[in-house]
Image (cartoon, helix red, strand yellow):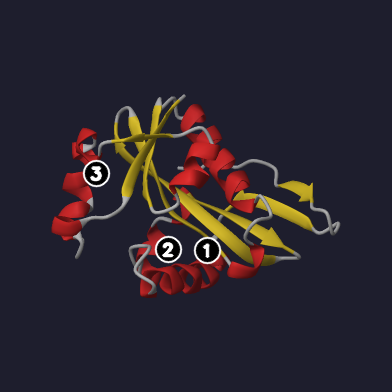
């Protein structure tokens, strides 16, 4: 569960405040829309609104002027492993540092939960490496394979890259 913290506004070059905060139920609709867009492109697993409602406490959102522009979640896979998943941004908000802000909040949550390993499966390898992750073999995460991969349409032809950060 993501712990409640004060939103931290960050000023961008254009003086627009970006706030990264714990998601609330009112965020389900923008989260669903954003995740659906990524899922339609085949780069994120879909999440139903019901699942998002049940898992809302796992999400962090980034907003600009009250509009949700980014999201990410932290899913516990074992006693010492969590996964960053459903990490996405509105296209017009890329290259503003928002993705790194979301990852930073998720890392803080893993630290709070005293979970030493954070993994992700991604196509954005350079982004994760820039944020302190290392590329590893997917096979080192049997927890992931048995929770999500068994239900994935790409199970036998997965082209995502596994990354890991030890904290």
**87 in relation to 5, above or below:** below
Label 1: few (<14), some (14–19) or many (≥20) C-alpha neighbours in 10 Å: few
Q: Tell me where residue 157 appears, x and y as whole percent.
A: 18, 58
Residue named by callout 1: 25
Nearest to N terminus: mark 2 or mark 1: 1
Instruction: Find the distance from the CA under tag 3 to the CA under tag 2.
Output: 22 Å
Nearer the viewer's eye, disc 3 or disc 2?
3
Rendered residue at 62%/60% (across/down): 94
Rendered residue at 49%/53% (across/down): 72
Nearest to N terminus: mark 1 or mark 3: 1
Instruction: Find the distance from the CA under tag 1 to the CA under tag 3.
Output: 26 Å
Report the side of 13 relative to 113 (left or right).
right
Q: Are marks 3 and 2 in contact (CB under 8 Å)?
A: no
Residue named by callout 3: 144
Name the element at disc 3.
helix
- Front residue of this view, candidates 138 and 22: 138
Instruction: Find the distance from the CA under tag 2 to the CA under tag 1.
Output: 6 Å
Rendered residue at 84%/59% (across/down): 14
Report the side of 7 relative to 90 (left or right).
right
The reply to whether residue 3 is in sight is no
Nearer the viewer's eye, disc 1 or disc 3?
3
Q: Are marks 1 and 3 in contact (CB under 8 Å)?
A: no
Residue named by callout 2: 53
Q: Tell me where residue 21 appears, x and y as whole percent.
A: 63, 50
- Front residue of this view, candidates 150 and 53: 150
Nearest to N terminus: mark 3 or mark 2: 2
Name the element at disc 1.
helix
Q: Tell me where residue 82 appears, x and y as whole percent.
A: 37, 37
On residue 86, which mark appears? none
Q: Are marks 2 and 1 in contact (CB under 8 Å)?
A: yes
Label 2: few (<14), some (14–19) or many (≥20) C-alpha neighbours in 10 Å: some
């Amino acid at each position: 569960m993501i712990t409640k913290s004060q939103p931290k506004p960050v000023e961008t070059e254009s003086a627009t405040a970006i706030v990264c905060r714990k998601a609330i139920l009112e965020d389900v609709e923008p989260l669903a829309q954003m995740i659906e867009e990524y899922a339609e492109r085949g780069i994120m697993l879909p999440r139903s609104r019901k699942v998002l409602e049940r898992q809302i406490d796992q999400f962090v959102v980034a907003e600009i002027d009250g509009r949700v522009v980014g999201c990410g979640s932290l899913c516990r896979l074992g006693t010492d492993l969590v996964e960053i998943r459903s990490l996405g941004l509105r296209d017009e908000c890329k290259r503003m540092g928002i993705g790194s802000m979301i990852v930073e909040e998720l890392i803080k949550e893993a630290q709070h939960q005293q979970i030493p390993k954070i993994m992700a499966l991604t196509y954005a390898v350079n982004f994760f490496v820039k944020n302190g992750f290392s590329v590893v073999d997917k096979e080192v995460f049997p927890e992931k394979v048995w929770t999500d991969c068994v239900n994935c349409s790409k199970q036998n032809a997965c082209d995502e890259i596994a990354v890991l950060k030890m904290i």
